Image: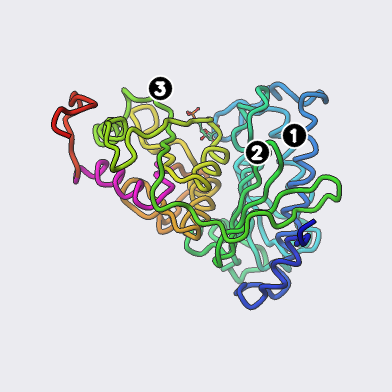
Amino acid sequence: MGDLITIERHIIEQQYNYPHATGELTKLLHDVSFAAKLIWRQVTRAGLVDILGSADEINVQGEEVKKLDLFANEQFIKAIGHHGRFAVMASEENEDIIFPPKNKYGNYVLLFDPLDGSSNIDANVSVGTIFSIFKRKSTSEEATLEDCLQAGIHQIAAGYVIYGSSAMLVFTTGNGVHGYTLDPTIGEFLLSHPNIKTPKQGKIYSLNEGNYRYLDDGVKKYIKYLQMDDKETHRPYSGRYIGSCVADFHRNLLYGGIFLYPRSKKAPEGKLRLMYEANPLAFICEQAGGRASDGKNRIMEIPPKKLHQRTPLFIGSEDDVKIAEEFEQGLRDIELDEELCPPNH
Ligand code: P6P
């Protein structure tokens, strides 16, 4: 059996690599991984325990909240902050910021989406938890909303847990991306994917093509471009879309490719949230050598104005995202009705 390297041991062994690791970071990540284990326990029992189905509530996003959403949100809030390290938290499920116990002593800020992709829960499709950690900026006794509205470049850590065939925690603190797989027999996340690097170019594209008619011409042309036959550039790409951004992102991170949730006539700002999905995934993607933008601007430099602000998202392999941006910005063009197999190619 290979060396069993837990998250804690991995961080301590690389202490000099972790700019914020005064031991605090290890404890912050311990809390997050503890909350993730509680969620994993319920997610894996979802088919057995009466937590399926709707909680008949609508969250701040105007989306129907499944019972497991509520449970995950409660677990995260309860499991975090008894040490007083987090001064303030914000959840994708809650309208306003949340003050954990003993928050007045906290130096850190936690933003999280407790269970993303929850519309897939009843179909046993992979769902995920996404989180972002910032350092507190305010000096007032109580932390403020502004502490939560920091641009993605100020994240000191970000990660996600994907609840799939196994539970895997993937995170970065700005020194590479590492993946830890939960060993349920010992209840520990063990290092399984050290220093993840995403391919510079992939062969997969992920978006909801049901929205095709509502998309900008630039994105329509990009999709058409990907569907053309050109061996040199690995086209046509394969379309893969799960409808759970953690699962779609994770697959593309490992295999290469691009995930897009662009703006459309149905979602003029895009659908995904800047603070709870785009920023943490962008930090991980860039640390793995990939690229993340809204089609033009680097995601991590977008100045947040609202806690639940949405953004278009182009994220994945660097070369794929760059080409998608060129189509989105009209720097590349093809005729929309161009043959998929042009005679002269
Ligand atoms: P659509 C899940 O609800 C989510 O927020 C993301 O995880 C996912 O990528 C997206 O919405 C799917 O949205 O419109 O394709 O169903």
Mark 2, ligand 1, within 8 Å: the answer is: no
Residue drawn at point x = 33 percent, y = 28 percent: 265
Image quarter (top left, top right, bottom left or bottom right) of the C terminus: top left
Residue marked by disc 3: 210
Element marked by disc 2 = strand
Residue 186 is left or right of residue 246, and the answer is: right
Query: Is 319 one of the magenta-colored residues?
Result: yes
Query: Is 152 one of the magenta-colored residues?
Result: no
Q: Which mark is residue 43?
A: 1
Q: Which mark is residue 115?
A: 2
Residue 327, percent across and down?
25, 41
Span of residues in magenta: 311-331
What's the amino acid at mark 2? Leu
In terms of sequence position, does the residue under pointer 2 or pointer 1 come before the other? Answer: 1
Q: Are marks 1 and 3 in contact (CB under 8 Å)?
A: no
Mark 3, ligand 1, within 8 Å: the answer is: yes
What's the amino acid at mark 3? Gly
Residue 252, percent across and down?
49, 43
Residue 276, percent across and down?
55, 47
Residue 163, percent across and down?
68, 39
Residue drawn at point x = 60 percent, y = 74 percent: 19
What's the amino acid at mark 1? Val
Measured Cα–Cα span from mark 1 to mark 3: 28 Å
Element marked by disc 3 = helix
Residue drawn at point x = 40 percent, y = 59 percent: 301
Q: Are marks 2 and 1 in contact (CB under 8 Å)?
A: yes
In terms of sequence position, does the residue under pointer 1 or pointer 3 come before the other? Answer: 1
